[in-house]
Amino acid sequence: MAPMDTVHDVIVVGAGPAGLTAATLLHAAGLDTLCVEARDRVGGRLASIDGYDVGATWFWNGEQRVTNLVAELGITAFDQHRHGDALLQDHTGVQRFRGNPIDAPAYRFPTGADTLATGLAARLPDAALRLSTPVTGIRLDNDTVHLQTGSEVLHARQVVLAVPPALAVARITFDTPLDPDLARLAAIIPVWMGAAAKVVVRYRAPFWRTAGLAGAAISRTGPLREIHDMSGPDGTRAALFGFAHATDIGPGFEQTVTAQLTAMFGPPAAEIEALHVQNWSAEQWTSPAGATQQNNYGLFGHPRFQQPTLGGRLHWASTETAPDYTGHIEGALYAGQQAANAVLTAATATKIG
């Protein structure tokens, strides 16, 4: 390492909600913090197209971290629409059920969940956040972690790896090897949304509400297996959204979705203004190859990810590693907070030592 090279107190890899939470807390605590992100935007799986969420959508009662952040950022959340009847589609046809047992009370973000990420990023100085900077290698040398990013090497005393563990071990070369058992565990822990596609269908008006439907449905035939109302407050910016398995996407997928919605919700469902398909399995900075085959969700929040590795200098932080609220935005915030606390504890111990 050249004498003039900067050694940051901490580098956070990933500018999703977990990484941004860790970075903002560490920066606020006075540590020289740098957050690097492979994408050209912040948010990770908090993503929107035209203001519609194509990643995380909801938060729920009892998720205090999200609730507090929404209040701090001045975001006015609104209730998920649940009123009306639900539908069930199977091989015999479509059945209508009185009431809506599918949707639970939840809250939405008027202009998309990624406003949480942009709000967190705004708390960092411009120099503390680098986009389009994928980390390709990590090496430990005594008390310094070296991170390869393209043609540049960055240096830090502590690192927060705020990406799904399976993505980390697939995309990053650990020149200082991880413990073999930890590496194997990281490789097989599922990526939340890694096997899913989210489909958002925009309409001129929420016609299903007029028909007394909630917009909520379950299908046993697909391709959309679960459907919900994604309209904005008071039905503005009308839309339905659904989840499909990534392996169902292929030629004619959009036409098949249109036919399914028309069969379920009637002829007005064919009058589509726009249709967005977000295939998370195809996102190189979310899902490694084989993500659609990993389904052992019992590995989420595994104790190994609550402990640092590489001599206590590398910390895990993603919704997959959170011991609670895994797969939720709340879980990502929890993991980021947990990693920040671990870094601060390590930094304090180093100073005392």
Image (cartoon, grey):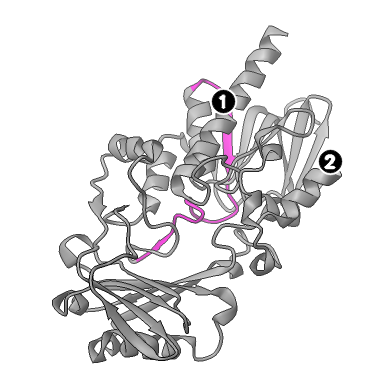
Residue to which mark 2 is pinned: 179
Residue at image point 45% right, 54% down: 46
In the picture, the quarter occupied by the C terminus is top right
For residue 100, side relative to residue 193 (left or right)? left
Residue 292, label in figure: none
For residue 174, side relative to residue 194 (left or right)? right
Residue 175 visible in the shown view = no
Residue 168 visible in the shown view = yes
| Whole-percent x, y for residue 106 in the image | 31, 53
| Whole-percent x, y for residue 150 in the image | 72, 52
Q: Secondary structure at mark 1?
A: helix
| Whole-percent x, y for residue 23 in the image | 53, 34
Residue at image point 25% right, 49% down: 77
- Quarter of the image where one finds residue 314: top right
Between 347 and 181, which is closer to the camera in this rendering?
181
For residue 322, side relative to residue 277 (left or right)? right
Q: Residue furthest top?
A: 352
Magenta highlight on residue 326: no
Up-down relation of residue 300 to residue 275 (above or below): above
Residue 341, label in figure: 1
Residue at image point 71% right, 32% down: 308
Range of residues picked out in magenta = 29-49
Residue at image point 20% right, 70% down: 84
Type of the residue with mark 1? Asn
Type of the residue with mark 2? Asp
Q: Residues within 10 Å of mark 2 (few under 14, many from 20)?
A: few
